Amino acid sequence: MEITFTINGQSTTVDVDGNTPLLWVVRDVLDLKGTKFGCGKAACGACTLHIDGMAIRSCSYPVQYASDKQITTIEGLSNGSELHPVQQAWEEEIVPQCGYCQPGFMMATAALLNQNPNPTDEDIDNNISNVCRCATYYRMRKAIHRAAEITNQNA
Amino acid sequence: MIRSSVGVGVVIGTGYVTKSIWRRYLTEFANTVEAPYQGSKVPSLWFEIDAQNMVTLHSTKVEMGQGAFTGLAQIAAEEFDMPLSNFRVVHAESISGNIDAFGTGGSTSISSLWTPLREMAATMREMIRLQASKQLNVALDEVKAANGIVTDGKQSFTYGEIVLKVVEWEEVDTPELKSVKDFKVIGKALPRVDLKEKVSGAPIYGMDAQMPDMVFGAVLRPNTIDAILTSADTSEAENMPGVIKIVREDDFIGVIANTYFEAENAKNAIKAVWTPNLLWQSRDIVEKTKVGKGKASSIQKSGNPSKYLKDDEGIITAEYSSPIGAHAQIEPNGAVAFVKEDGAEIILSTQVVEITRKEVAKRLGFKKDQVNIIPTFLGGAFGRRLHSAHAVQAAVMSKAVGKPVKCFFNRQEEFQNDTFRPPTHHVLKAKLNEDGLIEALEHNVSSGAVAVGSPLLPSIVPTLMGSDLGAWRGGMIQYSGIPNYEAISWFVELPFATSWWRSLGLLANTFAIESFMDELAIKAGKDPIEFRLAQIDDSKAGYRLKEVIIAAAQKSGWTNEVKDGRAMGFACSTDVNTPVAQVVEVSIENDEIKVHKVTCAMDPGLVINPDQVRAQCEGAIIMGMSAAMFEKMDVVDSQLKPIIYGPYKMALMKHAPKEIDVVLIQNSDTPGGVGEPPLGPIGAAIANAVFRLTGQRLRDMPLTLA
């Protein structure tokens, strides 16, 4: 079926089985590889992207529900040449190790900051539930607070 | 015949505890020797310098998060006398001939390349200087090379400008290397060289690889251990949408389809019957792994411990265990393969480039140099990518359809076909003397295979030793001030594949020994840190261990007292010449153990990049916490479970300590291992803290409060 949505600011139409998880349309049809496959059951969060500003685990989101929606992936998180505050903070704190799960964490963090510009440690614990096997959580927490700081300075 | 679960296929040990001295000598030697670099030492294979004066370093070690790319570039930049910003690092493709037969693992990337890489970089710099002297037509000793520029005092050129005009390289002798006091790049906390790609979501992993006209493969994988595939009806699968071909080989069945989803759907439509040999449960595995059941060999002995430990009088004994652990790396295993008539190209995340190349070449009847392995960044590895049968499968499927084929594991398949961390069982015995110090100590560790059957080791090595050096890693007694001690390793064959998992036996062995040391200190009425310090000798290794213990105690403000509902716990270990001591601070919240702070003092020798060494400590500590507090695979009716994150409980953001304080000590002028050693003490340190707080002695991982 034909499905039209906006992804990273571009209106896009794809012709695929409507039950295909959005993740595979993003990765294999639209060739945006920043959104990762980890488990296929919405359990690890590696595939997190934004739909209308909300963090969604795209491996378990049938593409047909994305019709007419605004999708943002890690590739569209930055504003052109300038990195998003979350990415800036991730760079400053040198968070990534293997890096594979990091786009999912950055997307989850960006969505959290949209709703809660000053998250406490408890807010972070309750909202950031992705899995990082390199266990970079210690630096991620610092980077989330730093991203909030950068966002608030820019505002 | 298609069999599930890989048998290790190697029988080791010949009798009850092997006492042979030469075996023990070999074992102790293996514990102390540093892994030699087994790759090329030709500078031109490693370095490419362009007109913009950028150096491309072709790394034989893969980047799996451990920061090897950054550390290796810093080491090379030092001898090139160039800033790190002039370096980019890529994985060496096997066709280039720049290959490391050992692969990447064992915390050896930096230590094994420390000398060869500096020599190659210094030689390359001297070759450029020689070329400059010819191009400028001045004597060699009038040409200086520094900061990426050569000059004769009148004219200056970048290395890149000189290289551009080279007609023929001339070899030079390896020059004298810089001394530590002159280092400008080594020792600096510079940002990772792969930071930009990893923050922007660049397609750098095996899972992101693609080739033109590529199709997708899916391999039928067992969900049952110790079973034989007795029938597989593929008639329905053949007619599913998008299916191109079904491949039936002696060792696997694969479906090839136009998209990933179509391949998965068709694979799921295969009616497969796996007939188990025996029906296994967790309790059978636990029973099989008990000390006394397998083949034993003495791996370390001093004095005459059995003289003191033979009767029951005054003997203190305790048993500990660790469960089956999954690697659970987030990027699944997989490969993109394209097989043509005259050769094959395989893109994949792997720790073993050379082994994969050999296996693919053998299966397809190619010579090794007809197969090009193109390594990518790894989305986690931890030992899971030491086995690349999936590369062979993707290649066989590509050959069958004449197109590139991408094939990878789904998550259930990853959890059920992992090469697991083996379960372990430990029996410790000790006797204290009148002064409350240890007169005799014995550690028995029983474990499934780690190094035995591994492609990294010639099978003769464990057979010669009579024991599995991976299983007993961290299992030796580091308190050489004790007059009588022995470590005995028991090897058991399990009905599923077990192998290397970050730090190998270190986590479980340290958990057992260091928990027992805590129990002994309490029995002796001594402070556990004083108790340990009193039993470490004055050798260089002993000195380094004492230094990290003292540093951790001081920095953490060590106390035996419970304050504000929090208690401290201590443990230490030595692995790949790197001593580590950790103090944790825990409380009990909502009936669960909460780790608030970890102080980690480590002496990895010379540090290349202190920020990345800290990052490895932070990650290893939380990964070790995860294994010690939460992780466990069960065997239920011959199926490994759970099959998904969540039910396979792991440490998440909410479990991570709010404070991790890393103290780095450098009591050696060469770099040691970093990636695994800080995983050692954490499990025991937590268990010891929990005892102080609750009086409960938790002797089984994952730690569970009564």
Image (spheres, helix red, strand yellow):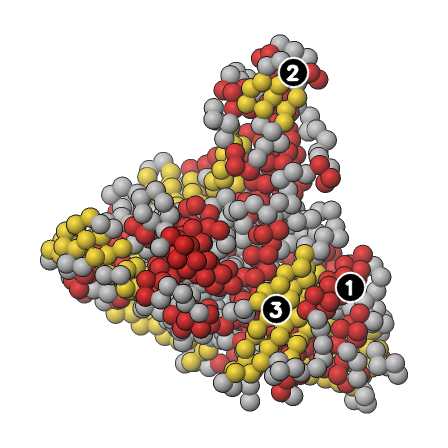
- Chain for numbered disc 3: B
Cα distance between the residues tagged 3 and 2: 54 Å
Please state if B366 lies on the left or on the right of B56 as rendered. Answer: left
Q: Going from the N terminus, do you reach mark 2 or mark 1 first?
A: 2
* Residue bearing mark 1: B546
- Secondary structure of the residue carrying tag 3 is strand
At 68% across and 69% down in the image, what residue appears?
A: B556
Which residue occupies the extreme right position in the image? B434
Which residue occupies the extreme left position in the image? A1
**Label 1 Cα crowd, 10 Å radius (few <14 / some 14-19 / many 20+):** many
* Residue bearing mark 3: B598
Of residue B439 and residue B267, the one placed in the foreground of this image is B439
Can you give x and y, in whole percent of width and height, for residue B588 in the image?
A: 56, 83
- Chain for numbered disc 1: B
Q: Is residue B143 above or below residue B59?
A: above
At 35% across and 69% down in the image, what residue appears?
A: A43
At 55% across and 38% down in the image, what residue appears?
A: B84
